Image: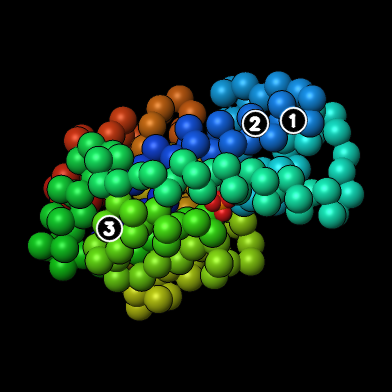
């Protein structure tokens, strides 16, 4: 029986992937190379540090620790400019209705995000109150595809992993859910999220009935 749903944030509740992309691209350009949207796929779901490492690998560049920290800080400054302008109009279609349906059916809700900016975004889109537990990048030490973020979410909710369903848009996130031995619904393209138990293109396709596997 499904007792809880755990949601990734970036790419599932809001489309912040475009802002991450624009900010990383700006850093790449400053460092003298280009960064495409296709490259950006590799950054989805992974931590800020890991994202920088992948970016530098793409550019064929090495930086020392101090320069890496400075690069991440600059990128995050630009990213904050975007997310500080967000409001509830940026919540993806069908998300709020589905979360409300979960609440009406006494199914618990947690956030399971790698982002250290998750609280800022949830406040700006006015959705903090939907969540019974919030696990973000300030609470985890292992990045997805490690299952830590989802296992911590289940623990905070007081439910077993086998009673949880994860919603994820990134390959690393789907892998994290499967490693946590949770059911996983992919949000996005079925081609990319083949490891998920099933894939929806948007929450407009989702309903409580589809949780009764
Ligand atoms: C994930 C995003 O949710 O959070 C990644 O999919 C991002 O692209 C990661 O790198 C860390 O986010 P932040 O906001 O802490 O830099
Ligand atoms: Mg995501």
**Image location (x, y in percent) of residue 24:** 63, 35
Q: Residue at x 83, y 48 (%)?
A: 67
**Image location (x, y in percent) of residue 34:** 71, 21
Question: What is the number of the mark on residue 140?
Answer: none
Q: Which residue is mark 3?
A: 127
Q: Which residue is mark 1?
A: 30
Q: How is the image coloured?
A: rainbow
Q: Quadrant of residue 140?
A: bottom right
Residue 2 vertical position relative to residue 28 in the rendered view, above or below: below
Q: Depth-wise, is mark 1 or mark 3 nearer the camera?
A: 1
Work out whether mark 3 precedes mark 2 in sequence or the reverse, and give the earlier one. 2
Which is nearer the eye, 22 or 110? 22
Whether residues under marks 1 and 2 lie with C-beta atoms below 8 angstroms apart, the answer is: yes
| Secondary structure type for disc 1 | helix
Residue 132 vertical position relative to residue 170 in the rendered view, above or below: below
| Classed neighbour count for the residue bearing mark 3: other residues with Cα under 10 Å, few (<14), some (14–19), many (≥20) | some
**In the drawing, does residue 155 fall left or right of residue 126?**
right
Q: Residue at x 68, y 51 (%)?
A: 73
Residue 145 vertical position relative to residue 135 in the rendered view, above or below: above
Cα gap from disc 1 to disc 2, whole angstroms: 6 Å
Q: Quadrant of the N terminus?
A: bottom left
Which is nearer the eye, 206 or 133? 133
**In the drawing, does residue 94 fall left or right of residue 23?**
left
Residue 187 showing in the rendered view: yes
Whether residues under marks 1 and 3 lie with C-beta atoms below 8 angstroms apart, the answer is: no
Q: Residue at x 49, y 62 (%)?
A: 136
Q: Residue furthest left?
A: 104
Cα gap from disc 3 to disc 2, whole angstroms: 29 Å
Work out whether mark 1 precedes mark 3 in sequence or the reverse, and give the earlier one. 1
Question: What is the number of the mark on residue 26?
Answer: 2
Cα gap from disc 1 to disc 3, whole angstroms: 35 Å
**Image location (x, y in percent) of residue 123:** 34, 59
């Amino acid at each position: 029986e499904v007792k809880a749903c755990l949601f990734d944030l970036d790419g599932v509740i809001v489309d912040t992937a475009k802002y991450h992309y624009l900010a990383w691209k700006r850093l790449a350009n400053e460092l003298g190379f280009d960064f495409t949207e296709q490259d950006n796929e590799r950054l989805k779901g992974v931590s800020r540090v890991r994202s920088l490492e992948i970016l530098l690998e793409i550019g064929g560049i090495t930086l020392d620790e101090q320069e890496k920290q400075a690069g991440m800080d600059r990128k995050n400054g630009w990213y904050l400019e975007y997310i500080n302008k967000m409001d509830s109009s940026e919540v993806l279609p069908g998300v709020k209705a589905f979360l409300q349906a979960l609440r009406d059916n006494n199914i618990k809700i947690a956030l399971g995000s790698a982002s250290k900016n998750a609280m800022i975004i949830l406040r700006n889109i006015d959705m903090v109150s939907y969540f019974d537990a919030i696990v973000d990048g300030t609470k985890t030490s292992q990045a997805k595809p490690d299952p830590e973020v989802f296992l911590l979410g289940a623990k905070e909710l007081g439910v077993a992993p086998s009673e949880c369903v994860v919603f994820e848009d990134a390959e690393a996130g789907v892998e994290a859910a499967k490693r946590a031995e949770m059911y996983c619904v992919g949000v996005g393209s079925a081609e990319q999220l083949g490891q998920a138990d099933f894939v929806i293109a948007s929450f407009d396709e989702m309903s409580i009935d589809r949780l009764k596997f």
